[in-house]
Amino acid sequence: LWRYVRFLRHIQLWLQRKPIPLPQDPKYKPQDATVLIPTICDNTEMLEVTIQKCALSRPSQIILVGVTNRKVLDPLVEKYVDEFRDHYGTSLKVLYSKEANKRKQVAIGIKQIASSITVLVDDDVIWPDRLLHHLLAPLDNPTVGAAGTLQQVQLRPGLTLPEQLFEILGSFYIQRRNVEITATTAIDGGTSCLSGRTAAVRTGILADPAFLAGYTAETWRGRILRADDDNFVTRWLYKRGWQIRVQVAPEAVVRTYQEVSPRFLKQCLRWVRSTWRSNYTTLVYDGDVWMKQPWSTYALYTQVPFPSILIDPLLLWLLLGATSPSTGTYTTSTVFLLWLALTKTAKFTPLYRRHPRWLLFLPATLLFGYVHAFIRFYALCTLSDTGWASRPLIDAP
């Protein structure tokens, strides 16, 4: 029951999800938002696509914050500054940080923002054309401090079979998160992390000197945290009484590229480390979460320590031990294994419908679910690694 009540409830709410409607007279329009993109310019072509797509939503401004890489960013800004201003009414500017540190880069950008809303965006996402209209809708509620979106992986053509597998695993990772945040925010408003890929936050929250001081100087066991930036933003919002909403409208789904090499495993490792650290901080130091978000506490913060590689065999052993020979252990075990397969694939039904051939990778994806337990354990043993495992340049001084 501990596991499967959560599964059934989350699937139910995913199927019943409804977009937050566009207000007839919105308080916030795209011109009230500034897009802030910290970047290390490791993929200029992808960054160029990102800013082009952001401009189609007509924000008041797009700010890039780079790292002394003027030979790359200055020409990029010069290429689009006139077009964005004339066609979309969007100004484009670039700032620079002396250090490749996402938190410090974001802080530099925030200090230059005058609009009511700041939209934090990663440098490898693709927006739908009218995303801002839908993303800003939840913020018409004065108790909502930030809004996020659902996500999809932007598929690449011409991949090898191993690369396709990594891309599929990344797609499943993101789809699992889509189901999770849709359900938990609908039940009690909770989410473990407001993804920094695209998040609209009230500028007044981010510009608070107390926020900036904590954001740029957060530590874990005495070490400066460079990763986990979006976890910090999430906890800060909740601790100060703000709500977080997720816009599930199809028009607000952002796409992102996924690692298609073994670096994907490093990315998973970073995500799991962030989850361990943030969950511990939430449960130990933000103790009122048990009262304010009881479902999220149960469904998110207390689930990580129970890996399937241990629980599934234990459940099967207990079930067989409680089954009389006359009932038939073969039938019992078969039904249980089919149930396990259902619980591990139901969340991904939309992906299988769009890409039926992905069913060929089903055995590998099920196996990865158990391999992930070892990633969790290794992450727990290496929590003192506070950098970006999949993007080594981010830690360069």
Image (cartoon, rainbow, N blue to C red):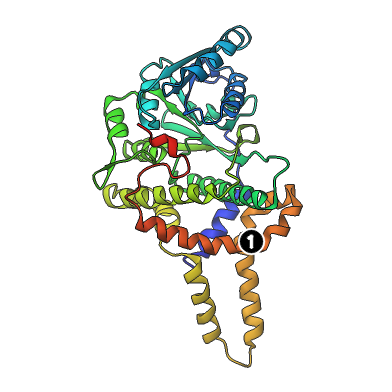
> What x and y, as percent, mark residue 244?
44, 37
Residue at point 57%, 60% (across, down): 368
Most distant residue in the front direction? 71
Most distant residue in the left direction? 222
The reply, left or right, for residue 297 in relation to residue 324 is left
> What x and y, as percent, mark residue 334?
66, 77
For the question of whether residue 291 can be seen, the reply is no
Residue at point 59%, 13% (across, down): 80
The reply, left or right, for residue 59 in relation to residue 286 is right
In the image, residue 164 sits, relative to residue 8, either above or below, namely above
> What x and y, as percent, mark residue 61?
50, 15
Foreground pick, 271 / 290: 271
Foreground pick, 146 / 102: 102
In the image, residue 163 sits, relative to residue 143, either above or below, namely below
- How many marks the image carries: the answer is 1
The three-letter code of the residue at mark 1 reads Ala
Q: Is label 1 in a helix, a strand or a loop?
A: helix
- The quarter of the picture where residue 306 lies is bottom left
> What x and y, as percent, mark residue 351?
68, 49
Residue at point 60%, 32% (across, down): 252
Task: Classify the position of the C terminus by image quarter.
Answer: top left
Residue at point 76%, 53% (across, down): 357
For the question of whether residue 247 can be seen, the reply is yes
Foreground pick, 168 / 59: 168
In the image, residue 290 sits, relative to residue 318, either above or below, namely above
For label 1, the residue is: 364
The reply, left or right, for residue 110 in relation to residue 51 is left
Most distant residue in the bottom direction? 326
Q: How crowded is mark 1: few (under 14 residues within 10 Å), some or many (20 or more)?
A: few
Foreground pick, 376 / 78: 78
